[in-house]
Amino acid sequence: MPEQFHRPVRRPSSAFDNIAGSGDSAEAVRVAHATASALLTRARADESGESTDRLIAFTAEHGIDDIAELWAVAPAVSLPGSLWRLYLLQLAIHHDPRTAALLYERGRVELASADAAVAGAPAPAGPEELVALIDTILRGVFRGDFSVALDRAAAFCRVQVSGATHIADDYEATEPGRASELTARARRLHTYANDLSAAAGLWRADGLL
């Protein structure tokens, strides 16, 4: 049997801070919504959970290029827009779990809110625990309460925002370039947190399209 080779991930986590939608045509947005709805419906209909496991494993190994052109054009607070952001989070954590754990743990210590508890990571949370966490959140999207999964992802983002902001402050005097990168990451994660929280509210009101 010939050896099988997998395509490399073409969008590593370095793209997490730079990625943007590829267009805004009505047809592209329509396709984004249709494919997101079909994927969610199919995965939820599979009571065995095998479809969900395959989806999570595929995106973790191959990246998000195959769905990027479809979902990146969708509005932020929409079904495809939410899935797009969740997959970006998964890719970033799988690609660089050490950095994710560093930001998360600093944020957990510094943040005076219940976000760490809502996100659901153990304390302390290392790289392996954060990889397991984001995969668990994605399983919740397809197998559990979708709004709860979105709320957990939003809380996770807020913890990382806190961590990135505080570590950026630490670097400001000695490594301003690194501080700027972390500040930009914090801003983007803050936006994601707001988008995912808004989407969770719409889902509960049957208004997330």
Image: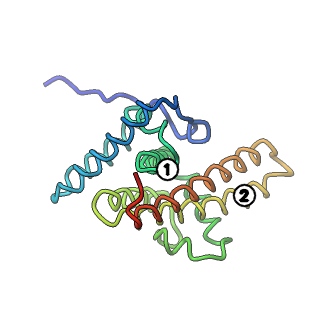
Q: Which one is nearer the viewer's eye here, 209 or 36? A: 209
- On residue 110, the disc is none
Along the polypeptide, which appears first: circle 2 or circle 1?
1
Residue located beneath label 1 in the image = 89
Q: Is residue 147 left or right of residue 169?
A: left
The residue drawn where x is 37% and y is 56% is: 138
Residue located beneath label 2 in the image = 167
User: Could you tell me which secondary element the residue under label 1 belongs to?
Assistant: helix
Q: Which one is nearer the viewer's eye here, 42 or 129? A: 42
Q: Is residue 152 left or right of residue 48?
A: right
The residue drawn where x is 76% and y is 48% is: 179
Q: Is residue 144 left or right of residue 184?
A: left
Name the residue furthest left: 1
Query: In this picture, is 95 found above or below 139?
Result: above
* Mark 2 burial class by Cα count in 10 Å: few <14, some 14-19, many 20+: some
Q: Quadrant of the N terminus?
A: top left
* Mark 1 burial class by Cα count in 10 Å: few <14, some 14-19, many 20+: many
Name the residue furthest top: 2
The residue drawn where x is 66% and y is 71% is: 111
Q: Position of residue 128 (x, y in %)?
A: 44, 58
Q: Amino acid at mark 1?
A: Leu
The residue drawn where x is 49% and y is 33% is: 11
User: Could you tell me which secondary element the residue under label 2 belongs to?
Assistant: helix
User: Are discs 2 and 1 less than 8 Å apart at CB?
Assistant: no
Q: Is residue 122 left or right of residue 16?
A: left
Q: Position of residue 22 (x, y in %)?
A: 52, 29
Count numbered badges in the picture.
Answer: 2
Q: Amino acid at mark 2?
A: Ile
Q: Position of residue 76 (x, y in %)?
A: 52, 47
Q: Position of residue 16 (x, y in %)?
A: 56, 41
